[in-house]
Image: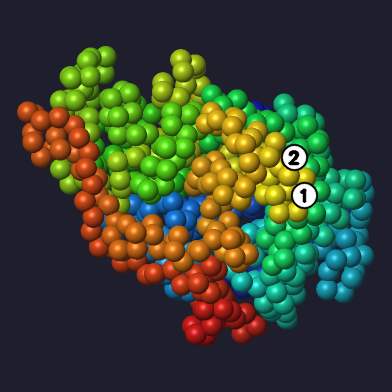
Amino acid sequence: MKKIILPILLGLGLVAVSCQEKLEIPQKGVVSYDNFYASDADAEAARADMYVNFLSNVAGTEGIDNPQQVILNYAADDVLPAGGDKKDHDAFRIFGEFNYSDASGTLKECYQRYYYSIYHCNLVISNFTNENKNQVEPKFTSNYTKQIVAEARVLRAYLHLCTALMWNRPPLMDRLYEADELPTNAGSQDQILEWVIAQCEEAIASGSLPKRNGTADKNSTAIMTVGFADFVAGKAAMFLSTPKYDVACKHFKAIIDSKNYALVDGKDWWQNFHAVGDGNSEKIFEPNFIEDPAYTSNAWGLGQPIFKGRWMCANVLNWRTGSLYSVPKGSQHDGWGGGAIQEDFAKKFYEHDGDSPRRRATFLTEEEWLYELEWEGSKVNNGSREEKEKDLARGIKPAGIFSHGPYFEWKFMTFPVVPEILAQGGSYMADNTGMGENSNQKNFCVARYAEVLLLYAEACFFGGDKAAGLAALNEVQRRSGSGKITDLTFENIMEEKQYEFWFENCRFQDLVRWSNLGKVDIVKIMNAQYHDGKNMVPTVYDRISDDGSAGKHELYVTYSAVDNVPFEKGKHEYLPFPLDFKTVNPNLHDVLGWEIMQ
């Protein structure tokens, strides 16, 4: 895939300094602010700045995690925060245990990064249109500025959708704010979501928004397009307090009818989550991770390009390699064991999908993990099953793996070498090509076509063409390799979404949405993840470590107490606003169950 090299506006000083300045102070720098935004060249630079800031903030790394990824996925009922013990990775495991507060650093980073990215969208919109405080007309307009305004409008809408689904009534920033202005809570969630839909529809109607040119067009997956605008508008319509299923159906059907997107083959499902699948037919938006030699970070003296693939998230989302006798091929060597697949869900998934390509690319069973993978320290990889059963170069050391059951997730692991079990004899690029083992060069996927089909099926079920909805649902089901669905039911749609999109930022917000509609008991679901509500987490052990070389591999699980706070309806569906932002901005306040923190 062609990597889009975006020039970066460091020389123009388009980087704010503090949290408050990021939202309020016009950018100034070496080039006069008054003389900028006056040509197509300036517009191109502003567009680059907008995308690069999205990459570094929303799609990038904060410390060893991506804030959006860990908050949304750890909060889901089918993921357990893992690590070395219950104090490991505590900065973000708190979101899986619902014992976070408004002082969380990860919470602050996530909020701040969304609004920093919104700010850079507004730099485009408020300077190339009259959508600014005093309705000042732009110094320069052209067909190109109309395009980048449409792109900025859609990206800004998506970012507001993200904030509205994570916080209740967050600020709606529809233009650049001046130094004497402070953001305030939106009037309602619906106000934001309706605005998101309107912004996307305005961008589409402008005729200036780029379109994907067929399923082979990789480059358009890295920018705002008509397809992504339809996706954002349709999804926002689904999250309204009274969903507008007709609006959702209209936008999702437009994507389907465009023929610009298609599911990849079932045997290639795994590629959606690895570098080899970047820009494939299924991707609607996934920004490129690029290497611009003019913009590097010399963190730890390594001179690593700052946008190169969520550095060290690769370690977090790898198996706990220090607890293993050696490393299976396909795994990097230094793994910290972050989000583990919840064992009850894994059992249900296996019962539903069996040995489907989708299931095997999401997690491995005990048998597959122990005996179908090659282990680097083993001398019997080509040996008999009996030899492998007694092989002390594979399996789990005596201490076990905390907060983990006998299923081994690897959907988002970094593959330095693509495992044979998935590659089927093919030759594929590694996820960390050209960089260190703890870097993941895979693009950050925001939206893929399978979600369009499943959301369309749901919208059709509640208010549309049920035959068309069933066809969309079966398109995903058929690709998964797990059979055909004969009835369009809410339960079938809900389960298919969970299987298809495990650890893809969807599950928790879907549960909140369905709970708000009275379709699921979110308290029961969320509190069952810790061993049926007993606040107990698993640790998986290997009997070969108990019995010595005379024994054989057999995994078993014990349970121990965890510092989980029961999920509280009316509170934990949304996050509190970060303390630092509330401290400097009296206009911003918590709602629902977090109000007591004020």
When asked about the image quadrant of residue 524, the answer is bottom left
Looking at the rendered structure, the kind of residue marked 2 is Ala
Q: Tell whether 268 sits left or right of 253.
A: left
Tell me residue 584's x, y (percent): 58, 81
At horizontal 68% and vertical 40% (from top left) the residue drawn is: 470
In the shown orientation, is residue 329 left or right of residue 288? left
| CB under 8 Å between discs 2 and 1 | yes
In the displayed structure, does residue 484 sit left or right of residue 415? right
Which numbered marker is on residue 361? none
> Which sits in the foreground, 434 or 227?
227
- Any part of residue 291 in sight: no
Task: Name the colouring of the figure.
Answer: rainbow
Question: Can you say which quadrant of the picture contains the N terminus?
Answer: top right
- Foreground: 194 or 311? 194
Where residue 244 appears, as percent x and y from the top left, is: 76, 59
The residue nearer to you, when weighing 228 against 22, is 228
Tell me the amino acid under the disc marked 1: Gly
Which residue is label 2 attached to?
468
The residues bearing labels 2 and 1 have C-alpha atoms spaced at a distance of 8 Å
Percent position (x, y) of residue 51?
A: 68, 48
Residue 284 versus residue 462 in the image, above or below: above
Note whether residue 533 is visible.
Answer: yes
Relative to 141, does residue 480 appear above or below in the rendering? above
Q: Residue at x 51, y 79 (%)?
A: 594
Q: Residues within 10 Å of mark 2 (few under 14, many from 20)?
A: some
Image location of residue 130, percent across then percent down: 89, 65
Looking at the rendered structure, which numbered label has been put on residue 464?
1
Q: Is mark 2 on a helix, strand or loop?
A: helix
Residue at position x 74%, y 40% in the image: 467
Q: Identify the residue shown where x is 70% and y is 49%.
A: 461
Q: Is mark 1 on a helix, strand or loop?
A: loop
Q: In the picture shown, does residue 561 fall above or below 6?
A: below
